[in-house]
Image (cartoon, rainbow, N blue to C red):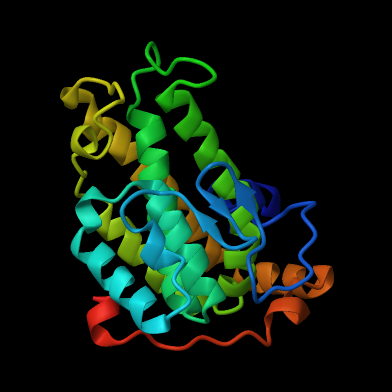
Amino acid sequence: MKPLATSLTLALLWTQVCTSQVIDDPARIEIYVTPYYNSAGPVIDVGAFSKGLGASSESVFLTTISEMKKSWDTLKFTEMYVAAIRLYDRGFRDEAVYWFYSAQYRGRLLRALLDPQKVGGLGDPGFELSHAWNAFHQLVGPYINGYAFGNMDQLILVIERVKKEGKTIPDLNRIYPDLSFKKKSEWEAGNSEVNDGLGKLLQTIKDQKTTIKQQRIDTGVEAKFSKLTSQELTKGSSQ
């Protein structure tokens, strides 16, 4: 069994399970990541799906999720994160976990494959997206994982799914035409590193179930999130 310190380090790198962030209402993700998402409203600015993601009508929202699934290979990680937030807030929390980890993967892949010489600085697309990933990771993680780690067997299945799907590299040049990436010959190695990192987290969770569960109880996370439930998406929205 791996040392607890190592396990927690891996968990933090992928999930952001520990935070000083105060969560008053575990049922609703209250965050602000400029300019993409503000829970007050909500205000959403992630592209073509923004209006549908913010719709008050559940049928419009679910139609939007279904359309996003059809465009899965070309979704930006910011779109995936916001979809995860909205799914969570509307009670589709099991599905939100999948979208969150998928967003994590695609965001990590982008960071791994960006040309380090052309990331730029404040105001440049590569720089801003890299920092947006970090903000979503830190702010959304405690909510999603507060819920997800309450059922680690189910979480393991989600991570296995994301890991398997992640072996197919999306066309980042198409998704982010304004960014400069490393040579295509380097993409496989970069993706393997991201995939391996998720695999290590997966093994850590399998090895440390009892310890993680006890830690959740000791810190009050288990009590705070244990009453949350999840409703199922319709087949058309979840496939």
**x, y (%) of residue 99?**
40, 63
Front residue of 199/227: it is 227
**Is 138 on the left-hand or right-hand side of 190?**
right
Nearer the observer, 205 or 176: 176
| Residue sitting nearer the eye, 127 or 16 | 127
Judged left or right of residue 229, residue 203 is left
Asked if residue 2 shows in the view, the reply is no
Q: Is residue 24 above or below residue 11?
A: below
**Quadrant assignment, res 21:** bottom right
Residue 86 position, x and y percent, is 49, 68
Q: Position of residue 57 (x, y in %)?
A: 43, 80
Residue 31 higher or lower than 187, as above or below: below
Q: Is residue 212 above or below residue 27?
A: above
What residue is at 65 percent from the left and 76 percent from the top?
27
Horizontally, residue 204 falls left or right of residue 32, namely: left
| Residue 111 in picture, x, y percent from top left | 41, 32
